Amino acid sequence: MAGTVTTMGAAPSAQPPAAPSAQPPATPSAQPPAAPSALPSAGGAAAAHRIAVIGGGPGGLYAAALLKRLDPAREVTVWERNAPDDTFGFGVVLSDETLGGIEHADPAVYAALQAEFVRWDDIDIVHGGRRHTSGGHGFAALGRRRLLEILHERCRGLGVELRFRTEAPPAAELAAAYDLVVAADGVHSLTREAHADVFGPSLTTHRCRYIWLAADFAFDAFRFEIAETEHGVMQLHGYPFSAAGTGASTVIVEMREEVWEAAGFADLDEQGSTERCAKIFADALGGRPLRSNKSSWTTFRTVVNSRWSHGNTVLLGDAAHTAHFSIGSGTKLAVEDALALAACLEEQPDIPAALRAYEEERRPVVASTQRAARASLEWFERLPDHLGQPPLQFAFNLLTRSRRVTHDNLRLRDAGFTRSVEREFGCPDGTPPMFTPLRLRGLTLRNRVVVSPMDMYSAVDGVPGDFHLVHLGARALGGAGLVMTEMVCVSERGRITPGCAGLYTDEQAEAWRRVTDFAHAQAPGTAIGLQLGHSGRKGSTQLMWEGIDDPLPDGNWPLEAASPLPYKPGSQIPRELSRAGLTAIRDQFVAAARRAEQAGFDLLELHCAHGYLLSGFLSPLTNRRTDVYGGDLPGRLRYPLEVFDAVREVWPAQKPMTVRISATDWAEGGTTAEDAVGIARAFAAHGADAIDVSTGQVVSDERPAYGRSYQTPYADRIRNLTGVPVITVGAVSSWDDVNSLLLAGRADLCALARPHLYDPHWTLHAAAEQGYTGPGATWPQQYRAGSRRPQTGRTDAPKPRLTLSQG
């Protein structure tokens, strides 16, 4: 299958520790040639006739070979500070997708690689003495040294000049003497450092230590092994890369920094660390030893650059970007960079245009890979959080940690394994995880899909009208297990905008009853939930499409909040709530909750997120109080818990109550991960049936890390550390994602907003696309004729990125 290796997150890229002391002495810098040649451009392509490549790793060598092969008249020189056979890694894994690009661009290299690859299909996950195996993953690996030999041979055969044990001249000198300088000088790139003002590098160091080792036998699968030691949790990542003789395997041992220190690795030399790792993972190794190769403990650094080129100098591979070894992408990305760079130089009229096109093509691919890699490395950083999961769920969670492997494609690879996980989860036969029911108190949700609260700003004097009936009614007909209202405000002053809905008058309650009656009568089995809140310091603003969070030009009402802090410059300064004010607002919540019961809602959610009133008490950035309602976390929790208790007391005991929180403020000094767990625990202890885990919108200068299901790790952490059910929300868009998150134990319910704006019948369509016809997704009688997925036209696969004739 295309891309199976990298998406599994199984194999390390070649990102060596590369400590300077481990490198052989470098010879003095060679003098660059005098000046660029004036040879005519070949075939009208970008005029890169004299090319300097800094760095003789796989990316630099492959770029040199491709560029020379495309135009034999080119003069291509590679500088490598180390000897030809010096390498700091052991095995390299390339995906089928990358190999396909190599096959089309250079059949000779492809054939040489094919002859060397070790292939296998299985992944073993070993924890607590139990091994679970998932098959169908299609790995291909070879030794890094052998890969370099193949590329050396190809470069020499094409006439590339290889200068080993030679420090490259500074990039600026090469740029003056060559048409193009390819800086493939690795994660510790001197080129990037020398021109940091232009490239704008950002380096992030992560929380785990790891060491790169090898074993002189071949594992029969990729192996993840978890060791729970007296010092903490350690993990082994191992895979075969050679079948010659008894074979050989790469072994990476990884653990959190504090575990590494507690275990005494800081005091051990290379040999001592190697022997200690072999002892800890003796079962995985069958008692055999490990060996090192200038191996040292290091922490992974994620490299991001704001620009990849500077004049005629361009970054490639780890110099431009890194992705954690747990998704095996370093060598893959470097080789794909080389393919794209060579193609762009052929396609574009000049070098500046080619370098722009190269970056435009590669940057989105790299960003996507880095997001997956970050999800994977953070999963391993939080590995202890997941060890209490059921065994098969833990294995599934590990396999899908990067979000690139999902329930659907794992089912295609290994249907038996996936079905075993589904049975452990409790899926009835033929039922996708998302259509497995969930019980909260006396309410049974027929499926795990939630229409997330979405402010519509379409009420008049707080009264929901025909728009709300059609909007919420359509989504109730669309099959979701739970349809949530927008934030409904407990008072006129508690509104965000003049268009926000309320529940502070009987007229409003009667209007809401019209909505719930419709849903219950026309979409039986769909639950309707009310989100109840107060705007706090974020009130008295314009409608979203008029100016989100901007104050009203006139007709403003006074604001109240935990502390007298405006939401953003130019916002109204709220009044700090007194004891009397706190009591009055608490009573408004209680009155609204009573009306919610009269209006026929099935579930009530207390809004303690997004910087609104109750959220303003929880965050240290917005609560500066010095009384009992401020200070440490118990103090900041005091008022939201008082409101929760008062509402829970009047809300019917058989009906569930949830709480939405912002698990991070995305700002320095804000709510921490530990705070979020503490907040969730506190509400659960007071009777919350689930925690709806969102993030941010608390302060205006937040810096969210957006991406696919980017808020789920916070829900995952809360669920697995507290045991309370959670709702995850935020960039969850496909039914495959929903199934994957549920089955992995990262969430109990998935709330989707924009997908339900795009398609009110999203849940029913998800059922149709999966061939599911059970009770978890019942089509209204009037719509059953549309319950079968329409036929679609044929689409063709994209053509290869770079195709060359045999030569």
Image (cartoon, grey):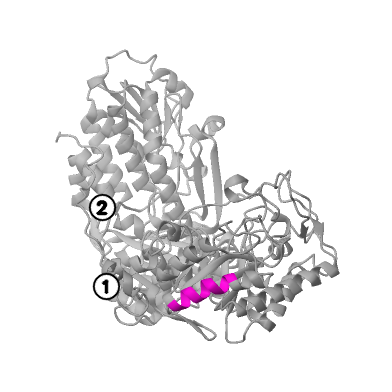
User: Quarter of the image holding residue 503?
Assistant: bottom right
Q: Position of residue 641 (x, y in %)?
A: 72, 74
Question: Dot 2, how many residues are within 10 Å of its Cα: few (below 14), some (14-19), or many (20+)?
Answer: some
Front: mark 1 or 2? 1
Distance CA(mark 1)–CA(mark 2): 21 Å
Residue 621 appears in view: no
Question: What amino acid type is highlighted by mark number 1?
Answer: Ala
Residue on which the image places disc 2: 96
Q: Position of residue 756 (x, y in %)?
A: 44, 61
Would you say 115 lies left or right of 453 here? left
N-terminal label among 1 and 2 = 2
Is residue 513 part of the magenta span, yes or no? yes
Between 319 and 640, the one nearer to me in the picture: 640
User: What span is in magenta?
Assistant: 511-521
Badge 2 marks a residue whose secondary structure is helix
CB within 8 Å, label 1 to label 2: no
Q: Is residue 54 above or below residue 214?
A: above
386 is higher (above) or lower (below) than 354: below
- Residue at 50% x, 76% y is 517
Residue 258, quarter of the rendered image? bottom right
User: The residue under label 2 is which amino acid type?
Assistant: Asp
In which quadrant of the rendered image does the C terminus lie? top left
Horizontal relation, residue 414 to residue 444: left or right: left
Q: Is residue 3 above or below residue 62?
A: below
Q: Which mark is residue 415?
A: 1
Q: Is residue 362 magenta?
A: no
In which quarter of the view is residue 292 placed?
A: bottom left
Q: Position of residue 689 (x, y in %)?
A: 58, 79
Task: Name the element at disc 1.
Answer: helix
